[in-house]
Image (cartoon, rainbow, N blue to C red):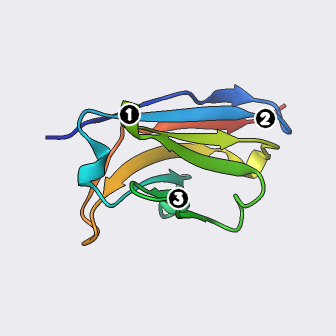
């Protein structure tokens, strides 16, 4: 069973930056995409950014465009989410996943990001 291990996150002031990492225990090329989602209490998990495991195609939520950058290191089977100009409304638990074409997904353990002064 593939495992995803997340790192990064924590407390940052508004306007600051954080980078999240998500390392897969197996070759990510066996999967269709790697994605970052976030969730706040009482709300559904929402897609923040996604990247195909092959090629350069990416997708971003409107709230992330221009501030967040998703990237991957296929040799390290790792995906990153660089977050800049963070806002209090970015506060959430962030999850990474590996996803198949048929939308089957494996999830990381989640990491808290808190944006507060």
Q: Secondary structure at mark 1?
A: helix
Quick check: marks 3 and 2 in contact, CB under 8 Å? no
Mark 3 vs mark 2: which is more N-terminal? 3
Q: Please state the horizontal and vertical placement of residue 19, each as a whole percent of the image.
A: 63, 33
Mark 2 crowdedness (10 Å alpha carbons): few <14, some 14-19, many ≥20: some
Q: Please state the horizontal and vertical placement of residue 109, each as a whole percent of the image.
A: 36, 37
Instruction: Report, in whole angstroms, how far the alpha carbon at label 3 lies from the one at label 1.
Output: 15 Å
Residue closest to the eye, 87 or 79:
79
* Residue holding disc 2: 116
Mark 1 vs mark 2: which is more N-terminal? 1
* Residue holding disc 1: 75
Q: Residue furthest bottom?
A: 102
Mark 3 vs mark 1: which is more N-terminal? 3
Residue at horizontal 78 percent and vertical 57 percent from the top: 66
Quick check: marks 3 and 1 in contact, CB under 8 Å? no
> Looking at the rendering, in which quadrant would you find the C terminus?
top right
For residue 13, side relative to residue 64 (left or right)? right
Instruction: Report, in whole angstroms, how far the alpha carbon at label 1 lies from the one at label 2.
Output: 35 Å
* Residue holding disc 3: 56
Q: Secondary structure at mark 3?
A: loop
Q: For marks 1 and 2, give the one nearer the viewer.
A: 1
Residue at horizontal 70 percent and vertical 58 percent from the top: 64
Q: Secondary structure at mark 2?
A: loop
Q: Quadrant of residue 108?
A: top left
Residue at horizontal 69 percent and vertical 50 percent from the top: 68
> Looking at the rendering, in which quadrant would you find the N terminus?
top left
Q: Please state the horizontal and vertical placement of residue 81, each as a whole percent of the image.
A: 58, 42
For residue 13, side relative to residue 75 (left or right)? right
Mark 3 crowdedness (10 Å alpha carbons): few <14, some 14-19, many ≥20: few
């Amino acid at each position: 069973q593939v495992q995803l291990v997340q790192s990064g996150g924590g407390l940052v002031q508004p306007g600051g930056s954080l980078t999240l990492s998500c390392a897969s225990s197996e070759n990510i090329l066996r999967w269709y995409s790697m994605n970052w989602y976030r969730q706040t209490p009482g709300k559904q998990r929402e897609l923040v950014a996604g990247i195909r495991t092959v090629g350069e195609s990416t997708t971003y939520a409107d709230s992330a465009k221009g501030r967040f950058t998703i990237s991957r290191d296929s040799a390290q089977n790792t995906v990153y989410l660089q977050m800049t100009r963070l806002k209090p409304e970015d506060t959430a638990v962030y999850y990474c996943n590996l996803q198949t074409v048929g939308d089957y997904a494996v999830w990381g353990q989640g990491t808290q990001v808190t944006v507060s002064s």
